[in-house]
Image: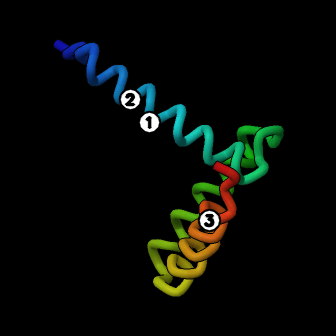
Amino acid sequence: MARTMTSDARKKDTREKIELGGLIVKAGLRYEKRALLLGALVDAVRRVKSDDTERSRLTAIGVEAFGNDDQ
């Protein structure tokens, strides 16, 4: 029997998904097709798993993008 998520767990899951969607918007990819977004993410996972230099490079790009936040 599958367990249902508690209300707090559902809220946490929903919040996480909203935050992840916000990253897509911040990256300027709001209007791209979902298949392209998924393909880019799958490719990124493959590259960072096999290359620490690529992980560092992409992390630096993300840190810079967060640093340019207008909040």
Q: In the rendered image, which quarter is residue 44 located in? A: bottom right
For the point 62% across and 40% down, which residue is it? 22
Q: Are marks 2 and 3 in contact (CB under 8 Å)?
A: no
- In the image, which disc is placed on residue 67? 3
- How packed mark 3 is, by other alpha carbons closer than 10 Å (few <14, some 14-19, many 20 or more), is few
- How packed mark 2 is, by other alpha carbons closer than 10 Å (few <14, some 14-19, many 20 or more), is few
First reached walking from the N terminus: tag 3 or tag 1:
1
Q: Are marks 1 and 2 in contact (CB under 8 Å)?
A: yes
For the point 52% across and 87% down, which residue is it? 53
Task: Examine the rendered structure and indicate whether residue 56 appears above or below residue 61.
Answer: below
Task: Examine the rendered structure and indicate whether residue 58 appears above or below residue 27.
Answer: below
Cα gap from disc 2 to disc 3, whole angstroms: 26 Å
Residue identified by numbered label 1: 16
For the point 53% across and 67% down, which residue is it? 46
- Mark 2 or 3: in front is 3
Q: Is residue 23 left or right of residue 2?
A: right
Q: Position of residue 2 (x, y in %)?
A: 21, 16
Residue identified by numbered label 2: 13
Give the amino acid type for the residue marked by disc 2 in the picture: Asp
Cα gap from disc 1 to disc 2, whole angstroms: 5 Å
- Mark 3 or 1: in front is 3
Give the amino acid type for the residue marked by disc 3 in the picture: Gly
Give the amino acid type for the residue marked by disc 1 in the picture: Glu
Cα gap from disc 3 to disc 1, whole angstroms: 21 Å
Q: Position of residue 1 (x, y in %)?
A: 16, 12
First reached walking from the N terminus: tag 2 or tag 3:
2
Judged from this view, the residue extending furthest toward the left is 1
